[in-house]
Amino acid sequence: MVNLPHEIWSHIAHFVPPSNLERLISVNSTFYDIAMDCRYRQLSFAYLDDRMLRNIVRLKDPVVAKRVRVLHVYPVFLKQVLDPREPDSPLVRRSLLLKLMAFATQILEQKRGSVRRKFKTPQDMIHAILDVFGGLPNVTDYHIVWCGLQDVPKSPVPLLAAVFQSNLRKLALDISLENVVSLLASHPTTRNIEELDLVIRIDHFVERSNHLLIMIDHLAPAVARLKLSLRKLTIQAWEPLDLSPFFRTLQWLPLLEHLTLGIPIQEPHLGDPQGLTAFLNRQSATLRSLTLRATHYSGPGFTPDTMSIDGWVMGVLTDVHIAHLRSLDISSSLFPFTASLACVLRFSTTITSLVLTGCYHTFADIVAVLDAFRDRHRAERLETLRLGSVALTPGLLDLLAHELPNLYRLELIVREVTTHADEYLQSYTSVRHRSESQIVSSLHRCSRFTPRN
């Protein structure tokens, strides 16, 4: 074996596909560490199977446990542990094929020793999982899905809360409001979180809770406790839900720079528009980036009413004043262009980066977007732009080059390449008609939009 410094072996490993790293685990200590880090960097605990059991045993070793950085947990496995007759459990063999596979597995396990035999009772397994979750010191990204599990025989809170460590930087919660109280109400160890992703659901099949009080007394205070560290916040309702009490109650977050909103396409969207308006104005001095998404995961009907969200967005924007916003990202096929344009008009005096994708944008649409920046000096307009989808034409390139002279990054999602865009192009005075042979030379000029070093 060639004796090379650790840094060189590490550099070589970057060119090896992750799927092949495990084959090189015995080459030397550098490849061993890299392969082990790749294997255990991201783990998921959801359904009880042999892989999960092997991970439980393996992670009892602190040398292995320290390699975990990203953890996904869906506590349905508690039901499988405490009720092995659960039909959804992979431990149950019902079909002949599954029985044959189980028999073959049993023969193999007799030769190498079964992992399951290490856990004599369900309580042994639960204690082992609790010890493992509490012994992951370097987890930085923690993803929890906890909704629709009211029939789990044991509360998952002790298991889920065991991972809350000082190194945690990102927390993603896909959680029902009914579970917020028990999980978030009393865990101050999460104060170093810089990124929080919230997907809020409602468990309709349980006794109706007072969602208003949960938002005011528990959810908003839990987020506010992160005010000394929180920089990125994502809030999304799985279905149309009035979150305005949450927005009104949420305190000022002095470090918050990036906000992402997932807005249900159906009424009432996120509730009273003035609730969100109040929160945006409260964060006016800190927000630098705003991302908007229209969603349609759940709700009445199969055909979304885009006119409804159009009016709701207008209601939010009427009194919004964000002084230092630099980036606006609207990427959704459900977001109507009129609502997108209203957002651009509201924030055009400050933003230098714009993403507008998800729908086809005509030449007239693009002209309308660029017109929103007319009041700014040409040299102070957009620096980065992502549009799509569009018809790529020489006229479009001329327009962008003329209106955005300082643009250093341009990304276009192109639906077609043609010599003309639509009927509006004919009347735009600064556009010249060109032959197809001239398109190539126009495309070469796109190099002016590549990033500068």
Image (cartoon, helix red, strand yellow):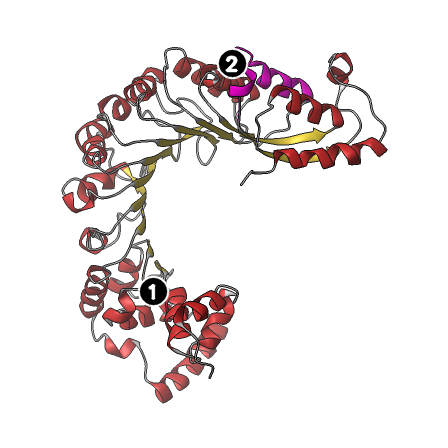
Label 2 packing within 10 angstroms: few (<14), some (14-19), many (20+): few
Residue 377 within the segment the image draws in magenta: yes
Q: Which mark is residue 125?
A: none
Label 1 packing within 10 angstroms: few (<14), some (14-19), many (20+): some
Disc 1 element = loop
Q: Which mark is residue 48?
A: 1
> At x 48% / y 63%, what residue is drawn?
14
Q: Are the residues flagged by discs 1 and 2 in contact, CB closer than 8 Å?
A: no
Q: Earlier in the sequence, mark 1 or mark 2?
A: 1
> At x 52% / y 31%, what residue is drawn?
332
Q: Is residue 116 above or below residue 217?
A: below
Q: Quadrant of residue 75?
A: bottom left
Depth check: 13 or 147 in front? 13
Residue, disc 2: 376
Q: Label 1, label 2: how many angstroms apart (C-alpha)?
A: 59 Å
Depth check: 140 or 401 in front? 401
Q: Is residue 315 left or right of residue 401?
A: left
Residue 387 within the segment the image draws in magenta: no
